Image (cartoon, helix red, strand yellow):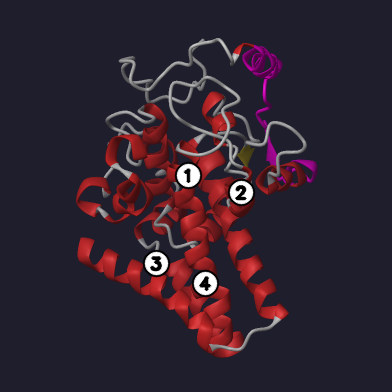
Amino acid sequence: MKTLTQVVFWTVQASALLVFVVPFSVGLVVLWAISHFLRAIGLTLAFHRYFAHRAFKMHRAAQFVWAFIGTAAMQKGPLWWAGHHVNHHRFADREGDPHSPMVSGIYYAHIGWFLNDLKHDRLEPTNPVIRDFSKFPEIRFLSSYFFVPPLLLALAMYAIGGFPWLVWGFCVPTVTLAHSTFAINTVNHLFGSRRFDTIDESRNNAFTAFFAVGEGWHNNHHRYQRAARNGFYWWEFDPTWYTIRLMQMVGLVWDVQPVPDRIYAEAIATRERHRTHKTISVVDDIGPIGLELAEDND
């Protein structure tokens, strides 16, 4: 299984080079953008903010549709993805974090962990994502047969527009989306600003936020994981949050978790003391944060 996963992954990565042998047009760039950003929202809205962090509630049909779109991103299934993300927060930038550049190096944090099925193919039954969402047969199907949605997308692109659509609508955006997602694990723990003094090295980065539809406001997210928005302020680009708000307006989602006022107050206070205050470091031995999603241990 590990070998097959690696062969498929690197084949798709190499397929992006086909962009140099197909015609270029503005329409194909638009196709790339739709395929990249729509599936990115599927990942961030369903896999991340819904399954992993319970930032809102939504109807079962909407849950499946967004999970299907997210699975089409070719980053395995929703239970695997969200379950490992919970573990990332549990041990952020310490031993036990599946993808920390501080613990395992940049390559492993960016790609290696994703391909290493021997270590990361299974999740414990007590993982809250497995415990609470494996009861839905359609979600279990997507998790077991995660190759189906991307395969259907690839076939649809070829059937509609031939080879150019396959390249621009599947190959290239699948690669750009993969590295946009993986960059949150690496770039956002190495480069950017820190609004909050979290116990990890999470950072806000506007560049990654653009291509990962709001996920680049990573320091915000690590400070208060439960919020439905990662861009805590209006000027922080967060299309996933805009989508959630639109769905809330038409009744498709509810119980949307806000950023508490005390977190905004903390941001102001932290900004004032950053020059003299000692930031909590990941080298401090604080132990595991805990598997549950309480988000805040104040």
The reply to whether the C-beta atoms of the residues labelled 3 and 2 are less than 8 Å apart is no
Query: Toward the viewer: 5 or 51?
Result: 5
Q: Do the residues under discs 3 and 4 have CB atoms within 8 angstroms?
A: no
Tag 4 or tag 3, which sits nearer the N-term? 3
**Farthest residue toward the front?**
275
Q: Is residue 31 above or below residue 45?
A: below
Of the two numbered discs 3 and 1 in the rendering, the one whose residue sits closer to the viewer: 1
Amino acid bearing label 3: Phe
Neighbour class for label 2 at 10 Å: few (<14), some, many (≥20)?
A: some
- State the separation of the CA atoms marked 3 and 1: 27 Å
Q: Of label 2 and label 1, which has the lower sequence position?
A: 1
Residue that numbered label 1 is attached to: 187
Q: Residue at x 71, y 17 (%)?
A: 261
Tell whether position 264 is magenta. yes
The CA distance from mark 3 to mark 4 is 17 Å
Discs 3/2, front: 2
Q: Which mark is residue 172?
A: 4
Pinpoint residue 209: horizontal percent, then vertical percent.
61, 46
The reply to whether discs 2 and 1 touch (Cβ–Cβ < 8 Å) is: yes
Mark 4 → mark 2, Cα distance in angstroms? 19 Å
Left/right placement of residue 30 relative to residue 85 reads right
Q: Is residue 8 visible?
A: yes
Label 1 vs 4, first from the N-terminus: 4
In this rendering, would 162 be left or right of 106? right
- The residue at which mark 2 appears reads as 207
- Give the residues drawn in magenta, as a range: 247-272
Q: Dot 3: what SS? A: loop
Q: What's the distance in space between the residues labelled 2 and 1, CA to CA?
A: 10 Å
